[in-house]
Amino acid sequence: MSDAPSPASTEGVDEAFAGIDGWSAGRILAGLLDHQAQAIDAVRHALPQLEAAVEDAALRLAAGGRLIYVGAGTSGRLGTQDGAELTPTFSWPRERSVFLMAGGDAAFTRSIEGAEDDAGAGAARMTALSPGPSDVVIAIAASGTTPFAIAAARAAREGGALAIGIACNPGAPLFAACDRSVLLATGPEAIAGSTRLKAGTAQKAALNLLSTTLMIRLGRVYRGLMVEMQASNEKLRGRALRMLMRIGDCSDDVARAALEATRGDLKCAILVVLDGLDPTTAAARLAAAGGRVREARGGR
């Protein structure tokens, strides 16, 4: 007999936790932590699926597309958190992060009963975005059965967008509605049905990996640093200066001069310092390399 989780595994009961309400706080904490570790193992098993999703998505986004996150409840909130953090971390344009939450904005902070079952709303809200071939939709649902997310994913594909489904049950209907599937087989929760726990941790980790790898593939990281960052205030100007000094192994004065010459464009300033280019040539070389510093420097 296979020990793989059943199609309804996220709603199953883990008998090992049947007495959890009678345990000491220390034992509860240890048990819950063990479950969190299992969540990360589930993500590890999904790495090949995440890799395929990244490769497809990077091609779309390089053409100027949007990242559109879709979900309900915990899954929707995790998607929103992931997308919202891409702008301060990687200078991802805000207009290229879109969030479709079942129940609307009010559902970000409270439960909107029945919203996740509204397939019509999912399809209509996605269609209103006019999804196209350069867009990438990430539909997230622990159960993989959420009508709102499934309908939105189908509407996205009809418009030509790439739809990526993330769910925690094998054979989830969401997968059939998507181009790429990421199965996070987390199984039953310590508290039956509470997918904000193990499934939520797996979803958060998978989203971290997916979006961060996408940003790296799109050239927004160089030598482990956030080089796409725009130095728009004093704090960020100081951060850009320190990064350039580190990358270029140069003095404060040299780094400041390069940033001034490039009007705060850190990636151009890197080419100015490391390769001795003038700002115009640096900008042209970066453009030819799709904004990727390493590629603009011949793989260095």
Image (cartoon, rainbow, N blue to C red):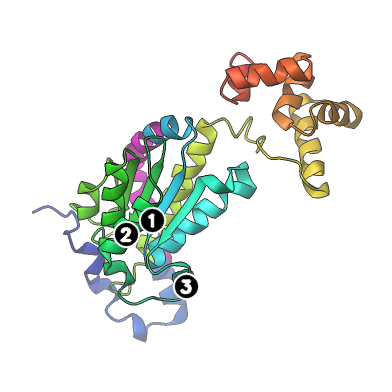
> With 15 as the anchor, is 124 left or right in this view?
right
Where disc 3 sits, the SS reads helix
**From the viewer's perspective, is residue 76 above or below residue 17?**
above
**From the viewer's perspective, is residue 70 above or below residue 243?**
below
Nearest to the observer: residue 207 or residue 279: 279
**From the viewer's perspective, is residue 47 above or below residue 25?**
above
Nearest to the observer: residue 93 or residue 171: 93
Secondary structure predominantly adopted by residues drawn in magenta: helix
Nearest to the observer: residue 289 or residue 196: 289
Per the rendered image, the range of residues in magenta is 33-55
The residue beneath circle 2 is 122
- Residue shown at the point (54%, 34%) measured from the top left: 216
Disc marking residue 70: 1
Q: How crowded is mark 2: few (under 14 residues within 10 Å), some or many (20 or more)?
A: many
The answer to the question of whether label 1 and label 2 lie on touching residues, with beta carbons closer than 8 A, is yes
Where disc 2 sits, the SS reads helix
Say what amino acid the circle numbered 3 marks: Ala
> With 132 as the anchor, is 250 left or right in this view?
right
**From the viewer's perspective, is residue 33 above or below residue 228?**
below
Looking at the picture, how far across and down is residue 47, in whole percent?
36, 40
Say whether residue 192 is magenta: no
The quadrant of the rendering that contains the C terminus is top right
Nearest to the observer: residue 253 or residue 155: 155
- Residue shown at the point (51%, 49%) measured from the top left: 97
Mark 3 and mark 1: span between their CA atoms?
15 Å
Say what amino acid the circle numbered 1 marks: Val
- Residue shown at the point (45%, 63%) measured from the top left: 77
The residue beneath circle 3 is 106
Where disc 1 sits, the SS reads strand
